[in-house]
Image (cartoon, grey):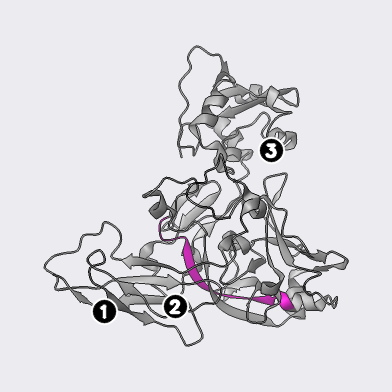
Amino acid sequence: KSESDGSTSPFKIPAREDLPTFEIEDVRTHCSPGDVYVTYQHGVYDVSEWADIHPGGTARLMLAAGKAIDPFWALYAQHMTPEVHEILERYRVGNVVLDEEALELLDASDPFSSDPPRHPSLLVRSPKPFNAETPPALLSDYLTESEVFYVRNHLPVPLIDPEEYILTVQGDGLPDITFTLDDLKSLFDKHTVTATVQCAGNRRNDITAVKPVRGGEWDIGAISNATWSGARLKDVLDFLDAGISFPKYQHVSFEGLDTDGTRSYGASIPLHKALDVYGDVILAYEMNGKTLPRDHGYPVRALVPGTIGARSVKWLGNIYVGKEESESHWQRNDYRSFSPNIDWDTVDFKSAPSMQDFPVQSAITFPCNNDVVHLSDEYVTVKGYAWAGGGREIIRVDVTPDNGKSWLTAELLERDDEESEKRFAENPSRRD
């Protein structure tokens, strides 16, 4: 984050001494559909003509009218390209005075200003929206402490009063029913499950090392394991006593209470996953035996074990049962997998199904990448994690110390016979 302009962008706009200087109060007067000024870093821009042609719609553009667009652009990665910054610079009309008072005004309009404090050991990949990894050294522990559990937010963290919290459950031809937090705790048995949550982009940096791809930076720490408690989704749906079954109903959609001002985060899972008594889908209100932290969905989140983390919607406000999957941008136009010859200019999101279950995943957490291993050591111990989605079990982990010439079978450190998430420690290997 730049101390001079409050921006978190990797792109820095040029100095323009040939343009006039504006006070932030002057910029704020340009906030009507035909007269829209915004600031970006230390520049002032007249984007009035974009009010009717902005890809996100007029309402979304007007959220930033007379304000800084930095925090809004941070919400959507498509802004973070040289081409977009070049287009914006064409509309520059001046520079903004960013003294202490002006920065306070900008902070007041920042939608991320009420985000919670975070543990300093988290490896921050994006401050707005906040995305951070669990340090590799802590991933060798079976359970991840809540304070250092990886964080993947798409939007600002909402402030929710638990006394006013309402969860609405509805669907095609179904009666609407609402639950308070106390209802979820008193009407349904508390179910506890130990489950790993992993971002679909975990280890993207390893892919980028082979071929650059678009998306947030992630090393091996966008994965963590915790114990979750809450009401089974199946029990909540059965409570409707509406005979919810396939093929009349095929998807269960979740909508969060986090918003960018015009839309909320959402996702969906297949109905069979929601109704499977062994699927362990819960509406969680506890994490590691304590109240759910704000960054992880307080007061209630969906928890969908074995499925990409994007489907475990946080700050859950609405559940909808229907024949179609969620209409959310993050369900229809994101989190899908394509062949290497497809890029953002040629992608057709309808041509691929939404990602749900995860394939097998493993990584070495000790030694860490670029660590120095002393040659005087006769043995090197290697630790890591292995995990598979969809309820599949890890049966073996093989480790090579010499780029595939030879292999050693790791020791699996199981929590108990019922858990499929495993850590591994290679049998100490003699150096050659």
The residue most toward the top is 18
Crowd band around label 1 with a 10 angstrom C-alpha radius: few (<14), some (14–19), many (20+): some
Stretch of the chain drawn in magenta: 219-234
Which quarter of the figure has residue 235?
bottom right
Secondary element type, mark 2: loop
Q: Which mark is residue 427?
A: 1
In the rendered view, would you say 383 is above or below 123? below
In the rendered view, would you say 212 is above or below 190? above
Whether 74 is among the magenta residues is no
**Kind of residue at disc 3:** Gly
Q: Position of residue 158 (x, y in %)?
A: 66, 54
The residue most toward the bottom is 417
Crowd band around label 2 with a 10 angstrom C-alpha radius: few (<14), some (14–19), many (20+): some
Q: Which mark is residue 56?
A: 3
Left or right of residue 397, residue 243 in this image: right
**Kind of residue at disc 1:** Asn
How many angstroms separate mark 2 from mark 3 (CA)? 43 Å
How many angstroms separate mark 1 from mark 2 (CA)? 17 Å
Q: Position of residue 145 (x, y in %)?
A: 47, 69
From the image, give the main secondary structure of the stretch colored magenta.
strand
Where does the C terminus fall, quadrant-wise?
A: bottom left
